[in-house]
Amino acid sequence: MTLTVFTYEHPTFTRTKSRFNDTWFYALTGVAGVVPASGSVNDSHYTRGTLTRRHCIKVGDQTAASPFTFEGTLAATNVGDSALSTSVAMEVKLTCTPDLKVVSANLGSPNSKGHHVIKPGKGNVPGHYISIPS
């Protein structure tokens, strides 16, 4: 399950602490491990326009004898104008896809297996980049 809160107010209005401070909320009933969350975009979206929370919910025990049901409440309030909205969305999938987690990297190019790894330098954008061959 993925919960996403997006606002068009970032970065122009969240960084200036605009008085048009949209609010958002989500809560799920019947799902263990997913706590309700709420906020105002001036605080929650100061550094980014999208917040994403992913949850992998194992329902095997609950669905052994009957269907699994849950309820969700998603809300966003556009404060003061209708031009720059905030939204809350939930996506539910039947399977969980584990996130890729890099625990170590050799930032040389090419690495010992001949794969090229981009590293910051003249002409590149600063940051960390990892090339993962398909």
Image (tube, helix red, strand yellow):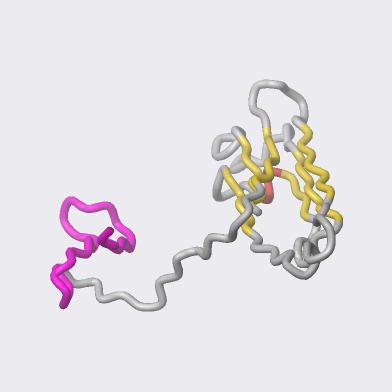
Residue under the image location 81 percent in, 51 percent down: 27
Residue 5 in magenta stretch: no
Residue 122 versus residue 16 in the image, above or below = below
Q: Please state which of residues 15 and 128 is positioned toward the viewer in this rendering.
A: 128
Quarter of the image with the N terminus in it: bottom right
Residue 121 in magenta stretch: yes
Left or right of residue 117: residue 73: right
Instruction: List x then y, in percent, for residue 117.
Output: 22, 64
In the image, the segment drawn in magenta is 110-134
Quarter of the image with the C terminus in it: bottom left
Left or right of residue 132: residue 66: right
Furthest residue in direction top, as rendered = 82
Q: Please state which of residues 134 and 110 is positioned toward the viewer in this rendering.
A: 134
Instruction: List x then y, in percent, for residue 104.
Output: 36, 78
Residue under the image location 62 percent in, 51 percent down: 93
Residue 24 versus residue 99 in the image, above or below = above
Residue under the image location 73 percent in, 32 percent down: 20
- The image quarter containing residue 130 is bottom left
Residue under the image location 81 percent in, 55 percent down: 67
Q: Please state which of residues 15 and 93 is positioned toward the viewer in this rendering.
A: 93
Q: Is the magenta stretch mostly helix, strand or loop?
A: loop
Instruction: List x then y, in percent, for residue 66.
Output: 84, 59
Instruction: List x then y, in percent, for residue 89.
Output: 68, 41
